[in-house]
Image (spheres, helix red, strand yellow):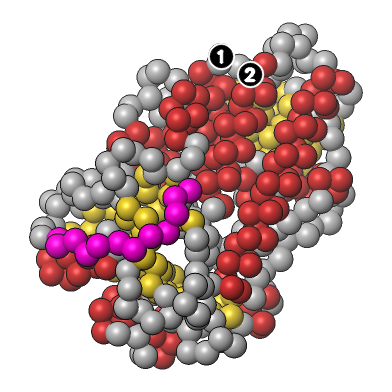
Amino acid sequence: MAKGTPHILIVGGGLGGLLLGQTLRKNKVSFEIFERDRSDNIRVQGWAIGLHTMLEELDTSIPDDMPSRDFVNHLLPLKYNYECAWYRHDRTRKLGVRDDGSGKFIRANRARLRKWLATNMPIQYGKHAVRIEEHDDSVTVYFEDGTSATGDILIGADGPYSPTRKYLLGGKDVIKKPRQGVINGEIILSGRDMEEQLQIGCSCYLVDASLTDEAPSFLFVGLSEAFPDGKSGKYFFNLFWRDDEATKKDFWTYSASSEKLYETALEKTKHLPAKFRSIVEKTGPEGMKNPPLHIYTLTMDPELLPKGRITLLGDAAHCMPSFRGEGGFHALLDALKLGKILAQLRANNTDEIKRVLGDYQDEMIERGSKAAEWSTTAFDEAWSGEDAGPRMIWGLPVVPLPDEKVTL
């Protein structure tokens, strides 16, 4: 490669990879971005994401030609504020966080967020990485379609089963599945049914569905997106429960029929008050996500990864259960931190690249691994008892929330 400002290769066109690309585009850093899916109609892992303490940095890190991020608001065109509610084991008091209109946090529809981050991005689709080669002053990645790309630095933003991480670990892998069974459902609601859900938790809500302390179970319900008519929207639910068998790759949910998944969801929520179990009942077998979303946990010691011209970002480095909703947030935070570092590099100097990427990698692995551990701990400790449950949501303290009348 020619001497001068390093050329960056980004493998993975998810949220983190795209935001990294935008930060590089803003700073006029040369880069290429590769996505394994074959078109921009790519899979979206999850439905919505909470963004909070990094919003100011996000706004200052993206190019001026980006449209307003109001586009990602999952509540549009509704005029209600973001709200995440938490119902403890008594399932009576409404706790949680609610935006006061100051924009301290937002809840973004993941598909809208990805589309926003893809604005003016030169994404190369159908590029599934199969091999990586390091040289003294460059890195080459080879793709399944027979093509390749060479750059000065390679960023693996390529998800839980990252080919880049596998290369860095010498073919080994350390990703695991947590002791959590999960069943997901999707449904379109309108009218009174949607009003009821908005009143329970305008953006989303979590209900302790545990029968005993020995069998923790939770129902998470969220609005994925409101539709343009302002009268209907797409909802989803995630039902989590403790299950040691869920650590196996062939856990029964991944081969079960939609009818069996629905029957199990009904059985595990039948003791809940009617307003909480109604969305599960209405979803029906046809609304079950089959197979359910795979959830993973990945923690690493910073010393495990070599330091050089290749590093990781997001789920490739610190995958975590979705119970705390922190996975996507940390991927975006990785991108902001890494983008700032890469924008400051002025030469393709191996020692300097190794130093700055090493510093980023140490902080990123430590922070992400702690978040992954907290996600598991939160599930283990969030049931029963007067004071059980999350103390913070989206960077704000959990407080009693007044009910708000919703009329569509």
Image height of 97 relative to 260, above or below: above
Q: Which residue shows up at 40% across the image and 18% down it?
A: 64
- Residue matched to label 1: 28
Determine the image quadrant of residue 131. top right
Report the magenta residues as a range.
395-406
Q: Tell me, yes or no, whether the highlighted magenta stretch contains residue 403.
A: yes
Q: Is residue 228 left or right of residue 116?
A: left
Tell me the number on the disc at residue 343: 2
Residue at disc 2, secondary structure? helix
Image location (x, y in percent) of residue 324: 52, 60
Q: Which residue shows up at 34% across the image and 39% down it?
A: 103
Which mark sits nearer the N-terminus, 2 or 1? 1
Q: Which residue shows up at 15% across the image and 61% down it?
A: 406
Looking at the image, which is closer to me, 237 or 330? 330
Determine the image quadrant of residue 7. top right
**Amino acid at the residue labelled 2:** Ala
Tell me the number on the disc at residue 389: none
